[in-house]
Amino acid sequence: MVQVDDDDGDARGWCVVVGNYCHDVLFRDGAAVGETLGGAAAFVSNVLDALLSPSPARYVAKVGPDFAHSVPRSRLLSSPSPTTLFHAHFHSRHHDRRLLRRVRACDPIFPSDLPDARFSLGLAVGVAGEILPETLECIVGACDVTFVDVQGLIRSFDPADGAVGLVPLRATPFFRLLPRIALLKASSEEAPFVGVEEARRRCCVVVTEGENGCRIYTREGELRVPPFPAVQVDPTGAGDSFLGGLAAGLMWGLPVPDAALLGNFCGALTVGQIGIPKFDPALLQNVKQLLEGRKSQQVGSSVIASSLDFKKSDMHDELQLSLAEAAKKACGGHSTDLDDNKDNHSL
């Protein structure tokens, strides 16, 4: 395989997404039920391509000669090692739980693999240990604002069977970079390893809480953002889609709480399908029209500043209701009672 680069264009870019693509094999009750494209970058790109047309993002990912998928508008870096492979094991009685194993790992992304450009927004979305501390430091240095998915920083991998575990963020070489990160995303499972109370004094922390939506933690306080109706089939990638939706919302000019609503919405759509979700075109058009009426600036301008807006807009509640109605239609008419519906999920 040869390296395939997107058009570098100007030295100033809008958004760069860094993280390897993967092969994901899903098992249910011990039997393989599907093989899909995986990796946080794949889910993020799926959302950005859907909600931003054309997508202003560039992607940096490393794959092996066995890579089996087509990913448009991406910077693919060839590696002699095989593409990262995960096995995700689910049980029919516990559909919201999974045992994740890293079977193979592609080479990491080095600072020299990054484009020589400056960006408004950087998304560091590793899943298999591919983002090195020095690489993250370069991403932070090249971007006005950097969002980081903590899974790429705190995952450990059993040397015997590849089982994925978690280590405290403070014990990693990434911890010192927190003051230079604008937003750190973690799942509720990962949050205890982050140390939210300590981390929120250094950067914004967003914790996704499944059927309870998400919480935004800053130095000044915290805010719960509600979920949307969903019928869960496969939770894989829902948190990644959330981050893509959050970034897309900010690119549309929404403040962080409003953009988090869009993130929850994208996560809800993701859990209803296996692998990378296919979004209904009519639904996407309706959502884009909804965002068009609420954006404060044009997509592509300097919407994302070093000081993010953590106040709800005057249209926050209206946006929530509109997205809830769209989610209700997408999942076949389930109730939009956001507090009582046990089928609600954001990520």
Image: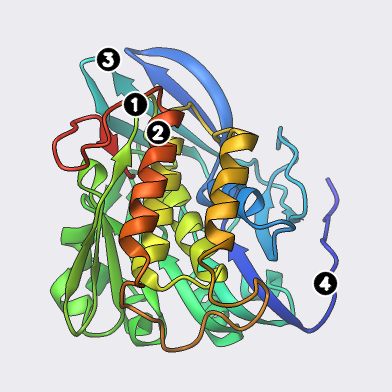
Mark closest to the chain's N terminus, 3 or 2: 3
The residues tagged by marks 2 and 4 sit, at their Cα atoms, a distance apart of 34 Å
Categorize mark 4 by other alpha carbons within 10 Å: few (<14), some (14-19), many (20+): few
Categorize mark 1 by other alpha carbons within 10 Å: few (<14), some (14-19), many (20+): some
Which amino acid lies under the numbered mark 2 shown in the image of this protein?
Val
The residues tagged by marks 3 and 2 sit, at their Cα atoms, a distance apart of 15 Å
Mark closest to the chain's N terminus, 4 or 3: 4
The residues tagged by marks 4 and 3 sit, at their Cα atoms, a distance apart of 46 Å
The image shows residue 316, relative to residue 208, as above or below, that is: below
Residue 128 at x, y percent in the picture:
46, 51
Q: Is residue 131 visible?
A: no
Mark closest to the chain's N terminus, 1 or 3: 3
Mark closest to the chain's N terminus, 2 or 4: 4
Secondary structure at badge 4 equals: loop
Q: Is residue 162 visible?
A: yes
Q: Pointer 3 and pointer 2: residues touching (CB < 8 Å)?
A: no
Mark closest to the chain's N terminus, 4 or 1: 4
Quadrant in the picture for residue 347: top left
Q: Nearer the observer, disc 3 or disc 2?
A: 2
**Which residue has dot 1 on it?**
231
**Which residue has dot 3 on it?**
92
Kindly identify the residue that appears in the image at 53 percent across and 54 percent down. Answer: 290
**Which residue has dot 2 on it?**
271
The image shows residue 56, relative to residue 28, as above or below, that is: below
Secondary structure at badge 2 equals: loop
The residues tagged by marks 2 and 1 sit, at their Cα atoms, a distance apart of 7 Å
**Which residue has dot 4 on it?**
8
Quadrant in the picture for residue 344: top left
Query: Which disc number belongs to residue 17?
Result: none
Q: Pointer 2 and pointer 1: residues touching (CB < 8 Å)?
A: yes
Which amino acid lies under the numbered mark 4 shown in the image of this protein?
Asp
